[in-house]
Image (tube, helix red, strand yellow):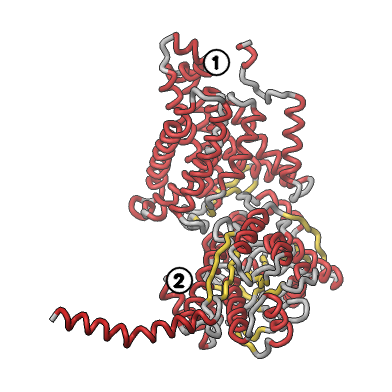
Amino acid sequence: MKKLVVFGFLLGLIAVGPAVFAAEAFAADKAPFKIGVMAPVTGSWASEGQDMVNIVKLLAEEVNNSGGAGGRQIIIEVGDDGGDPRTAALAAQRLISAGVTAVVGTYGSAVTEAAQDIYADDGVLQIATGSTSIRLTEKNLPLFFRTCPRDDEQGRVLADHVQRLGFKTAALVHDNSSYAKGLAEEVKAILDQAGLQIPFYDAITPGDRDYTATLTKIKTVNPDIIIFTGYYPEAGMLLRQKKEMAWDVPLIGGDATNNLALTDIAGKEAAAGFYFISPPGPGDLTDEMSLNFLAEYRRRFNTLPSSVWSIMAGDAFKVLARAAADLEEPTAENIAAYLHGDLKDFVGFTGPIAFDQKGDREGDVYRLYQVDQNGVFILAP
Amino acid sequence: MEFFIQQLINGLAVGGIYALIALGYTMVYGVLKLINFAHGDLFTLGAYLGFTFLVSCGLTGAVGVGPAVVICVILVMGFSALAGHILERAAYRPLRKSGRLSAVVSALGASIFLQNAVMLIWGAKGLAYPADLLPRVVVSIAGQPVPLIRVVVFVSSLAVMVGLYLFINRTRMGMAIRASAIDQGAAKLMGIDVRRVIAVVFMIGPALGGLAGVMVGACYGQITFTMGQLYGLKAFTAAIIGGIGNIPGAMLGGILLGVVEAFGAAYISVAWKDAIAFFVLILILVIRPTGILPERVAEKL
């Protein structure tokens, strides 16, 4: 009986062995493809960063389970930039020494800028996902791309909506970050030209809790609308404190205010009526691919990604996976050439994706949103 | 004039919180000549504990708003005091005999430890005290509408400060604290248990810090695990300006800093608010290097 078992075991080995070896040999054929994710996993934008990492890891798992990108297994390395330019430089060094070919991320423009040259020097391709500051792509770095739009585009759309909604005077507030300041300058230039009055133009300090002094000052110039070009934590507190002052001037924000946490911080009552422009959010994606993915995401993490920027990271990953599948040798240079020239008719979660020669995304993605009485972000007419 | 009064009120509300946190720095410094860098993070801890009691445990729903706030404040102050006590036992007492520098490094380490502990326990995403947690009442002060919560915050921080002042100046324990602040050796010879004094100081300071944390949460909503850094820095500055080691000085310094900030933003530039505030503070220090109300250090010489 014992012999029989041993015999059976050997027989099994003979039958299964080659299959195992063959599979290994096949996988060993192609070296794994290493992608870095640089994201603010900690710090004040941690909500964005954690979503980014979750999305990319989930997508990578899907690709690997279905045989990899063109037979290559994808390995994800995470680098936490903490939403801070100084930490970003360290994260970039860490990802480079981990041997990544390409990097997805990151969110803040100033943070991307700190890491940009480090990646360029070491020949690592970077696809930024939330960094909309103009000058990032004006440096003509051959290996730099982004799946998010640029501030000049955003500034144009924001200024258009302010005029279209019929406002005549506007207070313009930014937070001195390179993103918010760039966007504010862009909007100001367009509104000045269109003849709108801008009696207040100044910057608040992000991370502060009390903006009542600023709001009281803005109130003295009595604008038709306040334009705030910074991020959601400050936008939320501006709304909350504006409500406490019982002042009902409308507020419009840029795409960095597109985060569900805004309603939590401001409270539903104070957030109601807030306008912002943004690429379509997670709740507005209605194509089958996105719906399936979001369902899987919800099953895994019990919630939806809180903003569109982490979805942009998903798109950056998809583009890289496609390049790795199509290219014989997916080096950073080859992928760059592929993205600049050959990537056509590729559909990501946020719509068709193609890149121009500077590495910017082509096409129009912005929409106007408004927060309704229940704190839900709805497309505004 | 209306604008001036409104901005003064804005400044006082912010300054009251700075003052409350500054008391923790100044008390510890007074007795130990140690800057407790972890104090800002005990403040953060207080804000998160408050969130847990008020929101996660549903205290307001269970016993009504008023009692809930009182219970929450007592619990938070108790737990913060406990945390401060543990901190003193673990990070400072073992280093009492070593150099001043080791204690400073230990304080910085404790600060980083606490900050990361808060992040790991409550998560890196910020939390928000619900806006409808407390009823929204607006009162009128000098013709200006002011949310009641801000008035409550300012008045209760003033009350706590006055209470502390009386405690320090009118009680036996207070006298022991003052004696230890002037000369620990002599205090010991007079039969004062200096170790107990230090332990008490390290419970009162963090309790006030925790209270300030709940106030910031209730007042502004958003709490993040990094919030202690900025508040800690501002309060530390306030303590220095007032004359570190001196309790009325810390109150004065905190309120002054808040008001200078508000007026800087109001009359000069919002973006330059902090720069202006710190410039004024440097000016004060140039004129009075030991702060507005200096602790009587000279007596020791």
Q: Disc 1 is attached to a residue of which chain?
A: B
Give residue B182's mark: 1
For the residue pair A259 and A89, the one nearer the viewer reads as A89
Task: Using the rendered view, name the quadrant where residue B228 is placed.
Answer: top right
From this viewpoint, is residue A166 visible?
A: no
How many C-alpha atoms fall within 10 Å of the one at disc 2: few (<14), some, or many (≥20)? few
- Which picture quadrant has residue B191? top left
Tell me which amino acid carries mark 2. Thr
Q: Element type at marker 1?
A: helix
Q: Residue at x 68, y 86 (%)?
A: A343
Query: Please, which chain is the residue tagged with disc 2 on?
Result: A
Residue B98 lies, in percent from the top left, at 52, 24
Q: Which residue is mark 2?
A: A303
Vertical order, B294 against A288 (above or below): above
From the top left corner, tell me how far across and down residue A85 is, in percent.
67, 56
Q: Is residue B123 above or below residue A52?
A: above
Q: Quadrant of the N terminus of chain B?
A: top right
Q: Does residue B232 sit above or below B147 in this rendering?
A: above
Three-letter code, disc 1 = Ile
Give the quadrant of the C terminus of chain B.
top right
Q: Are marks 2 and 1 in contact (CB under 8 Å)?
A: no
Q: Nearer the viewer, residue A217 or A57?
A: A57
Q: Quadrant of residue A244?
A: bottom right
Q: Nearer the viewer, residue A79 or A71?
A: A71
Residue A285 visible to the viewer: yes
Of A224 and A140, nearer the camera is A140
Q: Residues within 10 Å of mark 1 (few under 14, many from 20)?
A: some
Which residue is located at x 50 percent, y 79 percent? Answer: A28
Pinpoint residue A115: horizontal percent, then vertical percent: 69, 61
Dot label at residue B262:
none
Residue B65 at x, y percent in the picture: 40, 50
